[in-house]
Amino acid sequence: MLLSLVSFIVTAVLLTLLARKVRAGGTHTFDEKIRAEMQSHRSRTLDVAAKPITLLSIPLLIFAATVALVWWLYHSGRNNAALAIGVTPIVAAAVGQAFTTFFPQPTPPDATEGKDGKTPATFPSGHTTGVTAEGLAIAYVLYSEGLSTPAILAALLAWPLLVGVTRLYRDRHWFSDTIAGWIAGVAVASLSIALYQAHFL
């Protein structure tokens, strides 16, 4: 549990420092370079490959899958596991919303507009935050409960990386947004793991 709390503190500090740098415009030049590099590799084949990865990062689908997993764990008598995984998407959404409110960053020029005609806030990448938090928390809990296989663990650990890179490739986020999403996701997962290790239920 101590290691999980240390991980949370370290990632929280890193996220705060990065947010301050973004707010001061200190990441703009680097973000532009990464964006130019990613967009120079766009192709029809990669566009097709990116679509299923994008589908696997849709918040509604992740929430539905989480609810199903929590229900199964709860009815299997694994209450701590169900609690830890159940709170993960809630905390991830709260963290993402807090930062997009206080540290707004303009989206890349070609980003899709929101329903209100405005481009959504991008820091940190909400998709990357949620997927990272869920992937890491679920991987740890399933492994600890003896319910995982090497293939499942590999998929859960690769999921956040693929989603983050795909968000960059599809020009939905700056690189600093994605890095922040990974960091925020690790922070949230660390809290969820600490909760699991505390054995409240």
Image (spheres, rainbow, N blue to C red):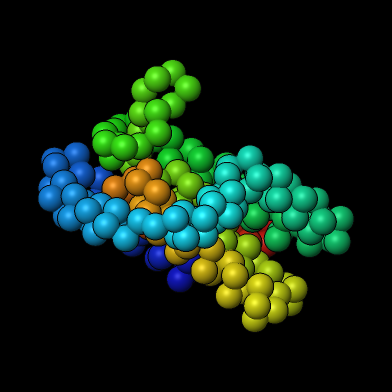
Give the image quarter of residue 64.
Answer: top right
Please report the residue visible at 58 percent of the width from the left and 42 percent of the height from the top.
Answer: 59
Q: Residue furthest front?
A: 44
Please report the residue visible at 65 percent of the width from the left and 55 percent of the height from the top.
Answer: 85
Please report the residue visible at 40 percent of the width from the left and 49 percent of the height from the top.
Answer: 170
Residue 76 percent coordinates (x, y)? 86, 61
Is residue 68 at least partly visible in the picture? yes
In the visual, does 141 lie left or right of 168? right
Q: Quadrant of the C terminus?
A: bottom right
Residue 71 percent coordinates (x, y)? 80, 51
Number of marks drawn = 0
Q: Is residue 88 above or below residue 149?
A: above
- Of residue 17 and residue 113, the one placed in the foreground of this image is 113
Please report the residue visible at 48 percent of the width from the left and 66 percent of the height from the top.
Answer: 4
- Of residue 108 and residue 66, the one placed in the foreground of this image is 108
Residue 94 percent coordinates (x, y)? 48, 38
- Of residue 83 and residue 154, the one placed in the foreground of this image is 154
In the visual, does 128 lie left or right of 29? right
